[in-house]
Image (tube, rainbow, N blue to C red):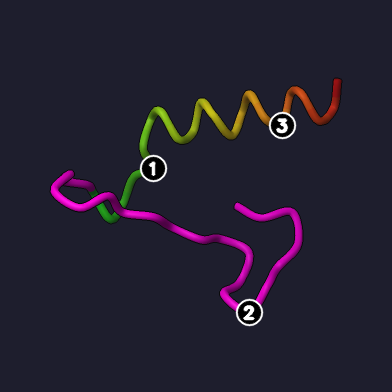
Amino acid sequence: MLQQACCFGKDVTFCPKGISFSLFSRNRVARELVERMDALRTG
């Protein structure tokens, strides 16, 4: 998720080649990274 929307919108999704994923759930590692970045921003 981007702080400000761009020409692609606010949510940008990357799908590594060869890794299976679910369209209906978010990746656990990605979710944890977002939470850690948010915590650093709010300090």
Q: Quadrant of the C terminus?
A: top right
Crowd around label 3: few <14 · some 14–19 · many ≥20 (10 Å)? few
Q: Nearer the viewer, residue 43 or 24?
A: 43
| 6 is within the stretch colored magenta | yes
**Residue appearing at x 17%, y 44% in the figure:** 19
Residue 11 lies left or right of residue 22; in this view the side is: right
Residue under numbered circle 2: 7
Q: Earlier in the sequence, mark 1 or mark 2?
A: 2
Q: Are marks 3 and 1 in contact (CB under 8 Å)?
A: no
* Residues in magenta, as a range: 1-21
Vertical arrangement, residue 35 with respect to residue 8, above or below: above
Distance, label 1 to label 2, CA atoms, is: 22 Å
Q: Amino acid at mark 2?
A: Cys
- Per the image, the residue denoted by label 1 is 26
Closer to viewer: mark 3 or mark 1: 3
At mark 2, the secondary structure is loop
State which mark lies toward you, 2 or 3. Answer: 2
Q: Main secondary structure of the magenta part?
A: loop
Categorize mark 2 by other alpha carbons within 10 Å: few (<14), some (14-19), many (20+). Answer: few
Answer with mark 2 or mark 3, whichever residue precedes in sequence.
2
- Residue 7, by quadrant, is bottom right
* 39 displayed left or right of 18: right
Q: Position of residue 10 (x, y in %)?
A: 63, 64
